[in-house]
Image (cartoon, grey):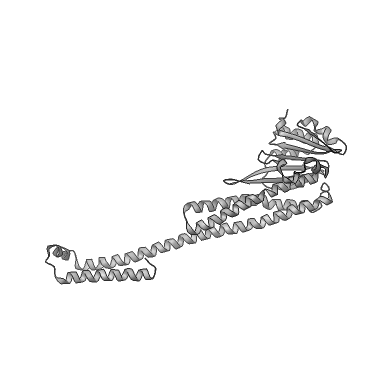
Amino acid sequence: MADASQIRIQSWRGGQLTTSTDVADLTRLVRAKDARTWIDLIDPSEDLVVATASKLGLHPLIAEDIIESNERAKVQLVGDVIHVVAFVLERKDQVVTDEVDLVLGDNFLVSAHGPIWVPDQAHQLKMGIGPALERGPDFLLWALIDSIVDGYFPVFDRLGDEIDEVQDSAIERPIPATLERLFQLKRELIRIRHVVGPSREVFAQLTSREFDQIAEPNVFYFRDVYDHLIRLNDELDSFRELVAGSLEIYLSTINNNLSTIMKRLTGVTVILAGIGAVGGVFGMSEAANAISGTEGSGFYLVVLITVLSAAVGVWLLKKINWL
C-alpha cells in the first residue's frame, strides 16, 4: 500500500472539493461526472507511480518516464494525454535541479516531483485549488509551470550579483580562488542552459494550439510563460558572455602583472650587472687595500662614480615605470 504522504488527490465537482490520500479512490473520483481532479505525487515510489498510471489508463511508457530521470525538459503527446517534463531550479552554494513530471488529461492533471518543490505555495493558486480546477486542468497546468518558471528569476538575480562580484575580483584580486569561482559559474550556467533552453521549446509547442487538451482561452497564459523564458534565455546568454569576459580579464590581468614583475626584475638586473661589471674589472684586491688604508684616491672615485651611475639608473627606470 502506498504511503499517504506520497499522494494527494483533490477533485473539484459541483463547487465542492474532495480530497483523498488513497490511490484506490482515484478511479471513482476521476470518473465522476463533470469532475476535475489533481493527483499530486510527492517523491513517489515506483509502485505508486505504476498504480496511479494503471488507475488512470496511462501508457506504461509515461510511468517509466516518471520513474526514470530525464536529462532535459520536453513535451510529448501520448495517446490522449500530454506529458510535460519541467525542472525546478534552486541555488544556494550552487545550482540544484529537481525534475517535475506533469501529465494532462481531459479532466485530470498528474504532477510528480521531489520534496524540494511545494506547488501549494505558488502565488497562482492563492485563491485555492478549487477555483483553479474549475477553470480546467489545463489552467492548473499553467499555474504550476508558471510558478516553476517564476522561481528561475531569483536564481538569475543571485547569479547576476555574483558575476558582478567576480568581475571586480578578476581585476582587483586575480587569485586562484577567483579563477575557481569563474569555472564554477561556467558549470552552473551550462546546467541552467540544459533546463531553460529546452523549456522554451516546450512552451513554443504548448502555445501552438496543436493540443486539444489545452483550451483556447488558456493558450494566452502559456504564451506569457513563453515570453518569460525568452527573456531568461537572453539573460543566460548575457551571463555566459560576462563570465567569458571575466575569464579574459583575469588572464589579461595575470599577464599584465607578470609583465610588470619581469620589467622590474630586468631593471634590478641592469643595475646590479653594472655594479658587478665594475667590481669585476678592479677585482677584490682594491677592497683589501681599502681595508688596510693603502688604497689610492682612484678607488673612492670609482666607487663614487659607480654609486652615482646606479642611482641614475634607478631614476631612469622609475621614470619609465620599470621599477
State the image coordinates of residue 107 (x, y, percent, origin top left): 83, 41
Vertical placement of residue 245 versus 181, above or below? below
State the image coordinates of residue 209 (x, y, percent, origin top left): 81, 52
Residue 189 appearing in the image: no
State the image coordinates of residue 306 (x, y, percent, origin top left): 25, 69
Q: Is residue 86 rendered to the left or right of residue 55?
A: left
| Of the pair 115 and 104, the residue shown nearer to us | 115
Residue furthest to the right in view is: 33
Vertical placement of residue 60 versus 73, above or below? above
Vertical placement of residue 80 versus 54, above or below? below
Residue 235 appearing in the image: yes
Q: Residue at x 70, y 50 (%)?
A: 199
State the image coordinates of residue 251 (x, y, percent, origin top left): 49, 59
Q: Residue at x 42, y 61 (%)?
A: 258
Quadrant housing the N terminus: top right
Q: Is residue 299 rendered to the left or right of residue 80?
A: left
Residue furthest to the front in view is: 127
Vertical placement of residue 36 versus 237, above or below? above
